[in-house]
Image (cartoon, rainbow, N blue to C red):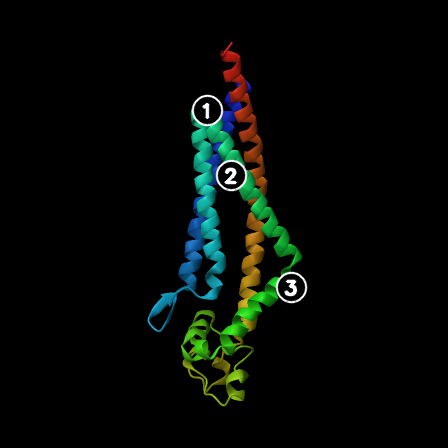
């Protein structure tokens, strides 16, 4: 096998090893965020609060990246055209999906934040969610109070629940801010971080795609020459 093919093979293997480590770190980071967010319990049912969406997506993408990188490593070591091209195709699909998401998030930031705000609005307006303890669980998770502020309870002539305060609710200084603003801010920061990570991954994946195509093409040509 010529020097160029061998070089592409080892570069692709090292590249995918690094990408695998990045994917694993993404999974670990997502798990740590999930752990810091914690779970909520409503009527005996345990689940994640709405702000867990981003770390769950991060864990999912990290798992996909690890799988694709493993396929790329195997393809490079075995010098398999089929595995290497499959790796390149999967990588291209992932790259396009990530690029589409990043573009949509950049061009529709206001719509995204409005959609996140509606999540809290719907939870507040839903009588079942409020009386069933869903909104109370959200307040505990986000350390917030009411939809816009604690005044939402006072307008409805309701006493502030314990989840609204850091200590006694008799002290106004202990009362948290509104859930809508906190949730939108949390998701906005999480989304911005996700965009920067995605942009970095897109650049890395593009390099991997180019080397995978070069390796597959060189191996295919090498095998054709040996047939004669």
Secondary structure of residue under mark 2? helix
Most extreme residue toward the right is 107
Q: Residues within 10 Å of mark 3 (few under 14, many from 20)?
A: few
User: Can residue 165 be seen from the camera position used here?
Assistant: no
Q: Which mark is residue 223?
A: none
> Which percent across, then down, holds residue 214?
56, 26
Q: Which residue is mark 2?
A: 90
- Tell which tag, 1 or 2, sits nearer the viewer: 2
Residue at x 51%, y 31% (from the top left corner): 85
User: Can residue 104 be seen from the camera position used here?
Assistant: yes
Asked if residue 225 is positioned above or below residue 76 in the image, the reply reads: above
For marks 3 and 1, the one nearer the N-term is 1
Q: Which residue is mark 1?
A: 79
> Which percent across, then down, holds residue 204?
56, 39
Please identify the quarter of the rendering in which residue 213 is found: top right
Q: Nearer the viewer, residue 224 or 189?
A: 224
Secondary structure of residue under mark 3? helix
Q: Which residue is mark 3?
A: 110
- In this image, 33 relative to 190: left or right? left
Residue at x 40%, y 77% (from the top left corner): 132
**Label 2 vs label 3: CA separation?**
31 Å
Q: Nearer the viewer, residue 197 or 50?
A: 50
Q: Residues within 10 Å of mark 1 (few under 14, many from 20)?
A: some
Asked if residue 152 is positioned above or below residue 60 in the image, the reply reads: below
């Amino acid at each position: 096998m010529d020097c160029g093919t061998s070089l592409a093979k080892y570069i692709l293997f090292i590249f995918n090893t690094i990408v695998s480590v990045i994917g694993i770190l993404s999974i670990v980071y997502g798990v740590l965020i999930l752990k810091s967010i914690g779970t909520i319990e409503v009527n005996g049912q345990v689940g994640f609060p709405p702000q867990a969406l981003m770390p769950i997506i991060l864990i999912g993408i990290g798992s996909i990246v690890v799988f694709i990188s493993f396929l790329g490593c195997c393809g490079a070591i075995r010098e398999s055209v089929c595995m290497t091209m499959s790796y390149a195709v999967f990588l291209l699909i992932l790259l396009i999906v990530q690029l589409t998401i990043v573009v949509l998030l950049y061009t529709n930031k206001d719509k995204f934040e409005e959609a996140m705000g509606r999540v809290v609005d719907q939870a507040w307006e839903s009588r079942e969610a409020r009386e069933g303890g869903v909104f109370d669980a959200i307040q505990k998770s986000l350390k917030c109070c009411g939809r816009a502020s604690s005044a939402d309870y006072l307008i409805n002539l309701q006493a502030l629940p314990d989840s609204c305060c850091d200590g006694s609710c008799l002290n106004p200084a202990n009362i948290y801010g509104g859930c809508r603003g906190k949730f939108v801010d949390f998701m906005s920061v999480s989304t911005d971080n996700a965009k920067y990570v995605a942009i970095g991954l897109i650049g890395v994946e593009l390099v991997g795609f180019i080397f995978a195509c070069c390796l597959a093409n060189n191996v295919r040509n090498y095998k054709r020459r040996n047939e004669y």
